[in-house]
Image (cartoon, rainbow, N blue to C red):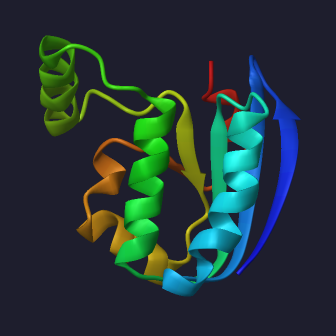
Amino acid sequence: MEITISQAQGDVPVTIVRAEGTFDSNAVERFMEPTQGAIDGGAENLLVDLSGVSFMSSIGIRILNALYFQLHPRESKEKDAEISALIHSGEYKAPHLKLICPTERVSKVLKMAGMDQYIEIFKEEAEAVAAFG
C-alpha cells in the first residue's frame, strides 16, 4: 500500500490521506505511520481517499474504526450512549473523519461493517472538504 498525505482548506484545515493498494494486514504500518504522524502533527480532520484501494480486509475496517475513536475521544457514558442512539437512528456522522471514493468492492465492505452509519462517504473531494467544520 502506498500513502500520500496532502492538505486542503475548507472552513477548517483538512488532511487528506490517499491510499493505493490493498488494505490488509500487510498495509497496517504503511497506512498508520504517516497517518499517525499527521495526527501527532496536529491534524484534527481526516479525509481518507479510498479510490485507489482495490481490497479491504477486516483489518482495514478496524484501522478506520480506531481512527474514528482517536479523533472522537470517548466522553461520559451518557454522552456515548446518546451518540450511539444517534448513530443507530442515522442522525450522527463523525465530524472529524470522512471517506471519499471507495471502489465498489470496498464500498460493499464498508456497508457490511456498518461504517456508513457513522462515517460519511463522499464521491467528490470538494464536497467532502466542505462537510468538515
Q: Quadrant of residue 123?
A: bottom right
Residue 56: image location, x then y, percent? 47, 80
Q: In front: 25, or 117?
A: 25
Q: Quadrant of residue 89?
A: top left
Residue 124: image location, x then y, percent? 69, 51
Tell me if 82 is positioned left or right of 17 in this view.
left
Residue displayed at 38% across by 33% down: 93
Residue 107: image location, x then y, percent? 43, 71
Residue 74: image location, x then y, percent? 31, 25
Tell me if 45 is positioned left or right of 125 in this view.
left
Quarter of the figure that contains the N terminus: bottom right
Q: Quadrant of residue 127?
A: top right
Q: In front: 38, or 86?
A: 38
3 versus 133 height, above or below? below
Residue displayed at 12% across by 23% down: 81
The answer, for residue 124, to whether it is visible in the render is no
